[in-house]
Amino acid sequence: MADSGATASDDEVVFEMGQFIRVYKSGRVDRYFGSDPVPATTDAATGVASKDRAISPDVAVRLYLPPAANEAEDNGGSGKKKKLPILVYFHGGGFCLHTAFNFVFHGYLTSLAARTGAIVVSVDYRLAPEHPLPAAYDDSWQALRWVASHANATGSGGEEEPWLADHGDFSRLCVGGESAGANIAHHMAMRAGAEELGHGVRISSAIMVHPYFLGAGRVSSEETDPGMAQSVVTMWRVVCPGSTGVEDDPWINPLAPGAPGLKGLACGRVLVCLAEKDVVRDRGHAYAEGLRASGWGGEVEVLEVAGQGHCFHLVDFASADAVAQDDAIARFVNM
């Protein structure tokens, strides 16, 4: 029997992006890509192992351990295992698409773990609009604190994750992600400046790939594709219905008047990766310039890849441009 309370307006589409997602006024969401998980495994080509851990009913992670974890330290044959940098990674998808467990991110992060020689912790956070922002930020903070809780662990506790406890170098704890994930990485570093991660842990660096930032007016990169530029504004209103708007909401515009000062960013280095044909490119440049001008005492590096668009590396992470971008990330993570 049809729902007598339903109206034609309930089937009104309030947001749609290509063949990826459709959101209805009723709250129904149709996702056409990125929701199907693939199992954790050991990759035959790279030797990178992966496994999943549930942190809470709402938050889980997939960990990637490169074969470098089995190498001994070069200290005279002590037999101690080499300690590896840790990259806590937040996937993109406009806060409303993807899972950390899908084939796109599993393949890419297996490759990235091999290239960086880092332990990668990929966070599966709740998606909007079913769980509007700030749910994704809160879930990501919970995951980051869980990682930090292993800093003084021995690897023998029942609740501990031995890959982190035994192999993690917490002096090289990085946060990163692409698109919405880069936005999350920024806010995790800002929150770490206002709240303690605990266990004496500090974030060493942040890696922001094609960050999803917006702002007042129209910048030149947005003029290259006005339709897409408008779409990402509409998407923000859908995933964060309580927002005051892209001009003055610090969640999407870290340079907004009244936003927390970037001087409070709690890491020593930031890498901003941009793509020439990306509509949010100039927002990324503005972010880097704002960081330099803020009085923040760290180092910011900008890498712009010519001729490429938003998240090009996820389409073919073995391409020359994707490898060059990942090489820059690898160098940054291992500093």
Image: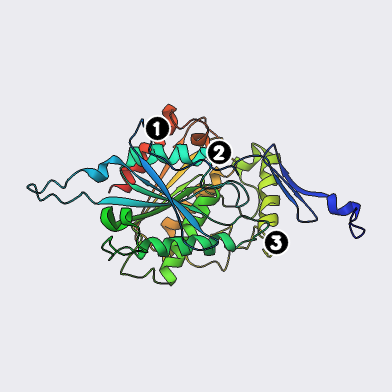
- Res 256 quadrant in image: bottom right
* Residue for badge 1: 323
- Check disc 1 and report its element: helix, strand or loop: helix
User: Which numbered disc flags the more N-terminal residue, 1 or 2?
Assistant: 2
Query: Residue 171: image x %, image y %?
Result: 28, 58
- Residue 262 seen in render: no
Rate crowding at label 2 as few (under 14), some (14 to 19) or many (20 or more) other CA atoms within 10 Å: many
Query: Residue 30: image x %, image y %?
Result: 72, 46
In front: 289, or 262?
A: 262
Seen at 35% across and 39% down, the residue is 48
Question: Which mark identifies residue 241?
Answer: 3
Three-letter code for the amino acid on which mark 2 is drawn = His
- Residue 201 seen in render: yes
User: Which numbered disc flags the more N-terminal residue, 3 or 2?
Assistant: 3
Vertical side of 319 occupied by 223: above or below: below
* Residue for badge 2: 310
